[in-house]
Amino acid sequence: MNAATPSTHPARKRLLLMATGAFIVVAIAYGIWWALFGAHFESTDDAYVHGNLVQITPQVPGTVVAIEADDTETVTAGQPLVRLDPADTDIALQQAQAKLAQTVRQVQTYYVQNDALAADVDLRNADILRAQAELTRAQSDVKRRQQLAKSGGVSGEEILHAEVALKSAQSGVAQAKAALAAAKAKLATNQALTQGTSVAEHPDVRQATAELRNAWLAQSRTVLPAPVGGVIARRSAQVGQRVAPGAALMTVVPLDQVWVEANFKEGQLRKMRIGQPVKMVADLYGSSVTYHGTVAGLDAGTGSAFALLPAQNATGNWIKVVQRVPVRITLDPEDLKQHPLRVGLSMDVEVDVGKDDGAPLAQVARKEPAWSTRAFEPAHNEVDAMIGKIIAANLAS
């Protein structure tokens, strides 16, 4: 038994040497792989799909009379989603139309009165000329009778009548001048209401026009369109519900505009730069589908820094916790088109940090809006045509 034992040591030794050699080879291979490839990648499974949650909210109060899209349905930008009862806004619009028509007619009278008041001023000037002629004649009569009175050719009674006529003529001149001043004041006042403008551009007409535009805009807002195309989610609106401005009725999620937010550890951000390529795998599809994207930017702080209750480290029981920084990653639109994602899904992310010539932070300010919509732009041509028709109809009458 003891004689056979030494024969087993060489075999065991060879096995140990072979195992050690294999381990060394694997370690060297791994070191080479890490130096050439592994060190150029940072990965994390703490990543999730994010997207815009566009809430549909009314801008005017009203009662819901129709819901034209439901949860999980796909809608296009501008498509009507909710309709409110337009009865109140219809009445307000009709009142604004009537007020504009009335204002146009009223302003038009200002221009007509200008001619009438100018003619009245001319008439008052003629009255002054007649009164002054009468005054001149009365003055001559008084002067002639006073000269004849010296020779006894005119009685005192005739002189008295002439003096009374003179006073009456003087009073007539004063009254004519007062009437002329009043006529000129009325003309100046009326001209001040019309000077330098036309009926259509008159301030009163423009104010009535603005009120009509406001009423028309309120009526157009009884139909709530989709600001963007996407999928309906979280519908809370119900037919017959009375809603107030700002109440959330449903949400539109544009799934073609989603992005990934990956939370990397502090040490993984040393070589991470904007524009670096990224490969991602979603738990929804598994490793058979690979998404491609680029690093769009790094957040301005860690997740704990923006938490509702930030951690307080100035305590005696402090324990260091490795912090994570959200990194925003854009997705290839073609990948999204072929394999749609949902907001909140988990992702495995791998960033190629081999190229570190990019900037760690965005250096150029944005010149265009990040997101925008034209769904709420009013059809100005329609209301302009309405206003022009009302003004033209009341000017011609």
Image (cartoon, grey):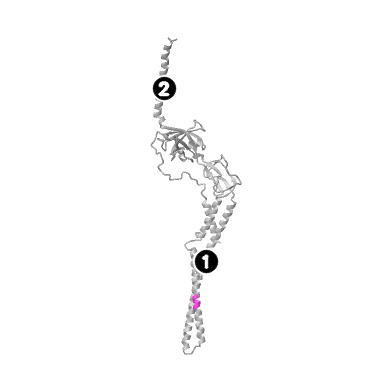
Which of the pair 107/252 is nearer the observer?
A: 252
User: On screen, 103 above or below 301?
Assistant: below
User: On screen, 384 above or below 79?
Assistant: below
Q: Residues within 10 Å of mark 1 (few under 14, many from 20)?
A: some
Q: Amino acid at mark 2?
A: Phe
Residue drawn at 55 percent across, 53 percent down: 216
In percent of width and height, residue 194 lies at 49, 63
Q: Which residue is mark 1?
A: 113
- The circle drawn on residue 288 is none
Say what secondary structure mark 2 lies in. Answer: helix
Q: Is residue 39 visible?
A: yes
Q: Residues within 10 Å of mark 2 (few under 14, many from 20)?
A: few
Judged from this view, the residue extending furthest toward the bottom is: 152
In percent of width and height, residue 342 lies at 52, 37
Residue drawn at 50 percent across, 83 percent down: 163
In percent of width and height, residue 337 lies at 50, 37
Q: Which residue is mark 2?
A: 23
Say what secondary structure mark 1 lies in. Answer: helix
Main SS, magenta region, reads helix
In percent of width and height, residue 382 lies at 53, 52
Residue drawn at 51 percent across, 82 percent down: 164
Q: Quadrant of residue 235?
A: top right
Judged from this view, the residue extending furthest toward the front is: 316
> What is the span of residues highlighted in magenta in the rendered image?
170-174
Quick check: is 396 in the magenta stretch? no
Quick check: is 173 in the magenta stretch? yes
Q: CA distance from mark 2 to mark 1?
A: 109 Å
User: On screen, 328 above or below 177?
Assistant: above
User: On screen, 273 above or below 28?
Assistant: below
Which of the pair 157/112 is nearer the observer?
A: 157
Which of the pair 45/145 is nearer the observer?
A: 45
Q: Is residue 127 visible?
A: no
